[in-house]
Image (tube, rainbow, N blue to C red):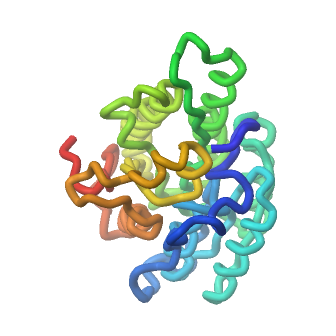
Amino acid sequence: MGQPAQKQDHQPGREYKMVPPPDFEPRFKGTDRLKNKVALITGGDSGIGRATALAFAEEGADIAFVYLEEHKDAEETKSLIEKRGRKALAITGDLGFAEQADRAVEETVRTFGKIDILMNNCAEQHVVEDFADISPEQIERTFRSNIFSYLFVTRAALKHIKKGGVILNTASITAFEGHKILVDYSATRGAAVTFTRSLSQQLADKGIRVNAVAPGPIWTPLIPASFDEEQVAKFGTDTPMGRAGQPNEVASAFLFLATEEASYITGQVVHVNGGTPL
């Protein structure tokens, strides 16, 4: 999923070549379940991040999202949010560095006045057949993108998230099953699960819920950016449901956790993986 640190979701423009294209559109008409809320989403320019941004906007939330360098994708996401009558703020930055994470949070609060929902989603992955060949630079890059960013953004955002707030983290099925050619990526997804469980305990008495979603094979621009043509053609067919999921199917899980319908749920991981028991 891209080469530089925090390549958030994919290589530029890859989604436009995907057949069929990923489905980002909300699956149901909104009922104002997030009316007057403000959500900050990292890696929100495409894939699961974009689908969740649109789902939140459909339910009445204004959206700030952070991306690295995919300006065309960010412009489209911003436009799709605004078409739903909501305000949208696109922020560029490499959130694997604390000062840029601080800046993204400050820009969100300066624009919208608050943060009600934080979704940590940005990530990258790099296929390595033999782990002995992995470079220290890649290890650092993957950890900066996939878990340092979660820690840095959350630390900054907690100064503004009040009682009733929600923190959501994107994990992965690889945190539970592992993946033989995505070893460093899988390690960061495991860290995201433990981060979720630990932070939820610290924030429970403050009335802030912390949960995660662990997607299985989801049809996002991550896939053609990471794997060869043969792997892409078979992607998701080994699940019990026999197919890859769509970004908007994962967004529905994030949306549920963001609403008061999930008021008694914290420290949990929701698995959206096509039926794989975990």
Instruction: Say if residue 170 shows up in the picture.
Output: no
Q: Is residue 156 above or below residue 86?
A: above
Q: In this image, 182 relative to 36: left or right?
A: left
Instruction: Say if residue 186 shows up in the picture.
Output: yes
Q: Residue at x 38, y 62 (%)?
A: 245
Q: Position of residue 122 (x, y in %)?
A: 61, 48
Which of 6/203 is in front?
6
Q: Is residue 65 above or below residue 178?
A: below
Q: How many marks?
A: 0
Q: Residue at x 45, y 61 (%)?
A: 164
Which of 217/117 is in front?
217
Q: Position of residue 106 (x, y in %)?
A: 77, 53
Q: Residue at x 68, y 72 (%)?
A: 77
**The quadrant where residue 136 appears:** top right
**The quadrant where residue 174 appears:** top left
Q: Position of residue 46 (x, y in %)?
A: 62, 62
| Direction top: furthest residue | 132
Q: Quadrant of the C terminus?
A: top left
Q: In this image, 199 relative to 13: left or right?
A: left
Q: Is residue 125 above or below residue 262?
A: above
Q: Is residue 16 above or below residue 215?
A: below
Q: Residue at x 58, y 57 (%)?
A: 221
Q: Position of residue 140 (x, y in %)?
A: 67, 23
Q: Quadrant of the N terminus?
A: top right
